[in-house]
Image (spheres, rainbow, N blue to C red):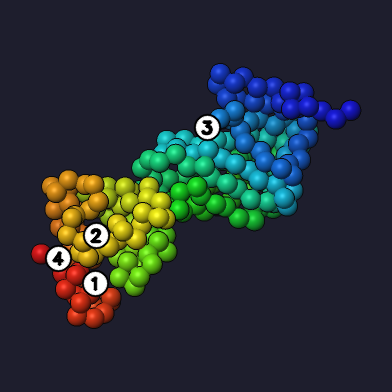
Amino acid sequence: KQKTAYEIYQCDWSSDVCSSDLATTVNGTLQPGSSGIGTLTVNNSLTFGAGGTYTVDVSSAAASRTNVVAGSGAGTATLAGTVNAVVTPGSFSPSRSYTILNAAGGRTGTFGSVTSSLPFVQAALTYDASNVLLTLTPGGFANGGQSGNQRAVGSVFDRSVASATGDFATVINALSQMSTGQAPGVFDQLSGQQHAGIGTLSVQVSQVFMSNFAQQTGGAQSLAARTGGAQDRKRTRLN
């Protein structure tokens, strides 16, 4: 008899905690919890097929998780397929790491790829003998530029993520919440191509940001030299 979802998983939807006593093979999508962050316990073994997707909901404070324990089986996890991180906007600077899967009986294989729902929050996976860790880091800003000047500004942010502090780190984190459609216009404003400041930020925040921006990049002249051209030098000069 083919098992239904209700027969496979016993769930307490009030706390988004589910469990299964069956060996589970995923060729579709596995997403702990009913909606949002949840925990799934598999009391047997778990296998992801090549076409399987592990969807993980993530906030700045926590992430969904699957625990594979040696209840009715070996408690092992065999990995393939992809991980899809559904990220709730928040603070991820300089980076945040989460255990998204633990297998008490050990892990074999790896996921083939990982994606993030936020284009400027980069996702990466690391592994040990029993765990899969997801790390989210602001970045990929240069890829959001359409012109050379926009990409140069984006590259400055990419290089500054790990070391930025204070207001500059706050701005980087805010930029990581952008969509790809917003990025070119924001980078134009930050390069001085527009004189309105930093989007909807107040003038006071803009002034603090530009001061930190100049300090972090070693002054406007170095950015101008990278972007090239007298016109670019005029636009990127920060006073």
Q: Quadrant of the N terminus?
A: top right
Marked residue nearer the N-terminal end (3 or 1): 3
Mark 2 = which residue?
A: 189
Mark 4 = which residue?
A: 238
Answer yes or no: is residue 36 visible.
yes
Rate crowding at label 1 as few (under 14), some (14 to 19) or many (20 or more) other CA atoms within 10 Å.
Answer: many
Marked residue nearer the N-terminal end (3 or 2): 3
Which quadrant of the structure image shows residue 43?
Answer: top right
Which residue is at 19% across, 70% downward? 235
The front one of 54 and 35 is 35
Marked residue nearer the N-terminal end (2 or 1): 2
Which quadrant of the structure image shows residue 19?
Answer: top right
Residue 89, image x, y percentages: 40, 41
Name the residue furthest bottom: 229
Q: Single out the mark in the foreground, 3 or 2.
A: 2
* Image side of residue 1 versus residue 175, left or right: right
Name the residue furthest right: 1
Q: Single out the mark in the foreground, 2 or 4.
A: 2
